[in-house]
Structure formats: structure tokens, C-alpha cells
Amino acid sequence: MSGAAGGRLVRLAETGRAPVRFLLDGVERVALAGDTVLTAILTNAPTLRQAEFGPERRAGFCLMGACQDCWIWQEQGARIRACSTPVAEGMRLLTRTREDWP
Ligand code: FES
């Protein structure tokens, strides 16, 4: 079974897919091949990201690429839509923008 204790999503099926390791805020996490970034994060954490304009935490909304609620950041700087981006081995993801970015 994939997913750490405290994940918002609980994986009930397709648990035999190959593991994919990625970093979330510097901590190694494990998803399964074929997961979106949103699924990868929410099987490991209670929320997806920090809201840009307030203290709230976000977890996506439409899950189909329409609402813009699932933008997260890569350490290299690029922002990605978590619900429509496949997770990949070695991804380095951030749940909030870096303090030193303009
Ligand atoms: S959850 Fe709506 S665009 Fe990703």
C-alpha cells in the first residue's frame, strides 16, 4: 500500500504499480507509476499546497485541469498544474513559493 499516514487520499486499488520516488518540500516520498502529481502528493500529505494570498491550504478542486487550484512549484522554478502532470522519478516539488523568488 502506498501513501503515508496522514495522506488525504487512501489508495484502495492498483497498488502493484512500480514505485516512483520524489521530494516534497525536501522530504522523500513515494508515489506509484501513472499517478498525477496531485495524487502523488495527496496520498502522502493532507493538503496540496499553501494558498498564495492567504493562510489557507489547498487540495485542488476540479481534478481535471480547469479550476487552477492545484498549481504547485518545482525547485527549479517552474510552476505545474498538479492534477494534469504525471509524477516522475526524482521530481523536486514545493508546496509554497520560495521566499527568494520575486
Ligand atoms: S484541480 Fe482544478 S486545475 Fe487542477
Image (spheres, rainbow, N blue to C red):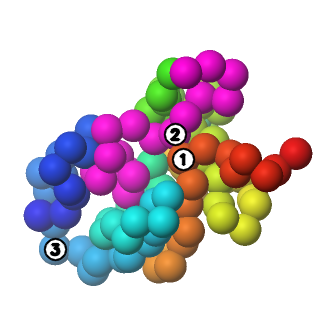
SS type, badge 1: loop
Can I make out residue 66 in this image?
A: no
Neighbourhood count class around disc 3 (C-alpha, 10 Å): few under 14, some 14–19, many 20 upward: few
Q: Earlier in the sequence, mark 2 or mark 1?
A: 2
Residue 92: give x, y in percent of width and height.
56, 68
Residue at the (20%, 43%) spot, across then down: 6
Disc 1 residue type (three-letter) = Thr
Circles 2 and 1 in contact, beta carbons < 8 Å: yes
Q: Verify whether residue 46 appears in magenta.
A: yes
Of 69 and 34, nearer the camera is: 69
The quarter holding residue 53 reads top right
Query: Badge 3 is on which residue?
Result: 16
Q: Main secondary structure of the magenta part?
A: loop
Query: Badge 1 is on which residue?
Result: 95
Q: Quadrant of the N terminus?
A: bottom left
Label 2 CB, ligand 1: below 8 Å? Answer: no
Residue 2: give x, y in percent of width and height.
19, 63
Residue 18: give x, y in percent of width and height.
27, 80
Of 79 and 35, nearer the camera is: 79
Query: Badge 2 is on which residue?
Result: 49
Q: How many angstroms separate mark 2 from mark 1 (CA)?
A: 4 Å
